[in-house]
Amino acid sequence: MHSSTSSPLLTFEKVLRAFGTGGFTYADVVVQLERLLAIGASPTAMLEALRRRERIEPFPEYAHVEVVRLLNAAIERSANESAVSVAEDGPDASQDQSLDAVFTPARSTSAQNGEGAVDALQGKRWEIDQALNGSIASKEPARSRNEETLRESKDNQAELGVMRDTLAARDATIAQVLNSLGERDTQLAASQQQHAKIVLMLEARANAGTQLEADLRTAQSRASVLTAELATARAALQAEQNKGRGFDKAWTESLASNEAARSRGEDALLEARRHQSDAQALRDSLSAREATIAQLRRSLGERDAQLAALQQEHARIVPMLEERANAGAKLEANLPAARMRAEATALELKASKEAAARLAAQLTRSESDLNAERSKLDAMKTQLNSHLELLRSWEWRRGFDQNTCRELDARAQAAEMGRAALQTQRDDLQNQVARLLSQLDADKAQADGMQMTASAGAVGTGTVGTGTVGVAAGRTRVGGSPLPKQGQRRTLIALPLIGSAAVVVAAVAFGAWLLVHRAPAAKEAPVSVSAPVPTPGTVIRDCPTCPAMVVLPAGRFKQGSVRESGSAFETPLHWVAIGPSLSMSSNVVTVDDFQQFIADTGRDMQGCDTYDGDWKYRPDNSWKNPGFSQAGTHPVTCVSWNDAKAYARWLSKKVGHRYRLPSASEWEYAARVGGEAVQPWGADGSTACAAANVADASAAQRYPGWSVFTCSDGYVNTAPVGSFKANSFGLNDMLGNVFQWTEDCWRADYTGAPIDGSARSDGDCSEHELRGGSWFSTPAYVRANYRNHFAADYRTSSVGIRLVRDISP
């Protein structure tokens, strides 16, 4: 390229890169393009530069159409000016130069624009014919030279026909290759959908624990289907590889054809070089597809391994289920024996009741010996009868307070003092009552054990018999009689109500004995209480070197913007709810933080796009050397989305809690602090430098021509984290300093986006969304709702990492 056009072309390439990174708006691109055309820049070369750039990063449709229209208009104006110059000078002013001035741009245009350039050549040839006819009419002596020129024009026309056929063949080859790539993309999408189906099936198997045997049979049948589908996918992949080899063979033949055509002139050589460049781009695209196919194969292998592990797990669980079923069958077989033992216990209890009745009869026979005491106890009869009613209730012990106990003790002592003659008989009666109670307690314990055995059998087999043993509302019934809960004593003997002093004395003696010997109340089991969710604003740090995580409050906010105030990427405006149990790091990950990760894992991260007046990939740059000086407290840069994910996994494994990248909704909610404002400064941006590290006056002094904020934050590149005012949630550098990766796959707008704060996974997952702006960002792009996106493996010195940590309630 001539030196006169090299500088404008480089300037135009810088303008395109600045537009791609957000440094220039579309209006800035149009202004710069018109300025370059005005100073004589080659529109053909600029059109070729645009196409090279779009192979790396496509322009938005509206910008592509307008820029191509301006460049084509400039090419047409240049061609018209050349034709007018030929008409004015005539054939005597060097006919060869006139033809070269027309054919050379036309051929170059043909080499770049394909079939449209051939139409332009036809127009130029018509203009040449008109100019030649006018020259013949005006200058008869030059007729012989004009006839020679006409013959040469016909020869050129024939050559143009050959070129048109060659271009048509090239276009057909390119179309065939594009169709092949489209078919491959379709097959890849089908494979990805199949992966999603496999994942859903695995999750369904994991959640169907209650029907493991049926799931095993379903998994086996599904495994056969998956094996067939895998074989189909492998066959499709093999077919694609065969197509790729066929394309290579076709390309080799095309190269041979281009070698043969190179002798036809400089224009054919330029055309061959252009086709070689296009074919190389297609080859690179094919290599990328093959890499994707290889990754897909690995993913299929992982799914096969997971399926095999699931089958092994099913095989391990089936014997357990069979063993449990056998145990249930044994318990069910033991139920009749347990019921018989319970019935025997019921008979024994009945015998105990009869013994108590006999004891009551014996007490009745002793009534004549207690007549002397009747007068002293008549006054207490009414109150003791009420106590006897309490003794008949199962809740007697709960309502028996200490004062009542002391009163009964005193009355029992008074009764003992009045019955000195009957001391021996009363002691015997008390001993009999104690033995009877012990026997009842033993019988109750035995019945409870049998009941527990029967209940365990019922649980193991899923059925409960309808005999004398049953469970209702947490209490056990034996032979239809209520028993106390576990840990309580039986506190009442069913005595017939006998209106005599002997019964009263026995009741008083029994009550006193019970107060002395009653069992302590059963302690309640401690209640398991889940740890509460930390209060919003609480700072969590899992280890001394771990990032400080701020607990965010739950809420909802309007995500995006209306079309009039933002871009199409940020529409439609919609509500999003953010739940509790979320904490976000107060700072982005620093160089010191990342150094620990590299030391533990040894991850290779060489190569990064850095800026020195121009964005360029530099293989020697990395997170340790991003092209400018950094301290350990500066945010780490030159990290891809894949690097950020690896860092989150490493930290999660290190501390035992789940760290991850935030979703775009979670990030925007935190940046807006739950409100509607997208920037914490005024519309003029004069106070932005107090809140964020952005493109400012300091950067403009080093890089003249930048569009910057009208303030100075003191930093050209990154600043130490926490150097600026935190937002109301306590988060630093949410805007500016470095862009921050999010979990979301890229989609061009919010149509169908989740409204629960989760990350979007239905877009182009080879690219992921970035938020926040950076030290390089101009005023229009430093706001909470601005969206950008890069490839998952792309590293640049303006992008860093911020993490979130889930909190288990």
Image (cartoon, rainbow, N blue to C red):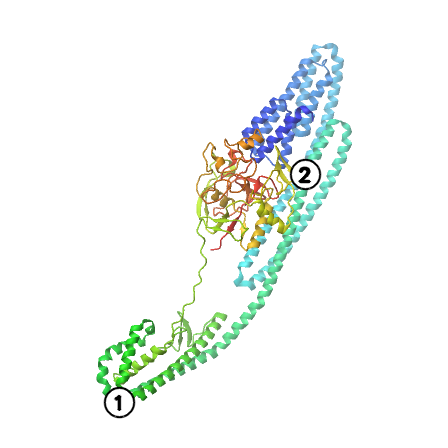
Give the residue type at disc 2: Leu
Tell me if residue 776 comes above or below residue 502 in the rendering.
above
Residue wearing tag 2: 282
Q: What is the secondary structure assignment of the residue under circle 1?
A: helix
In this rendering, the count of numbered labels is 2
Mark before the other along the chain sequence, 1 or 2: 2
Packing grade of label 2 (10 A; few <14, some 14-19, many >=20) is some
Residue found at the far front of this picture: 631
Q: Report which quarter residue 304 is drawn in.
A: bottom right
On the image, the x and y values in percent for residue 33 come to: 59, 26
| Numbered label attached to residue 369 | 1
Q: Nearer the viewer, residue 754 or 222?
A: 754
**Are the residues tagged 1 and 2 within 8 Å (C-beta)?**
no
Nearer the observer, 731 or 725: 725
Q: Which quarter shows the N terminus?
A: top right
Query: Is residue 239 visible from the viewing direction of this image?
Result: yes
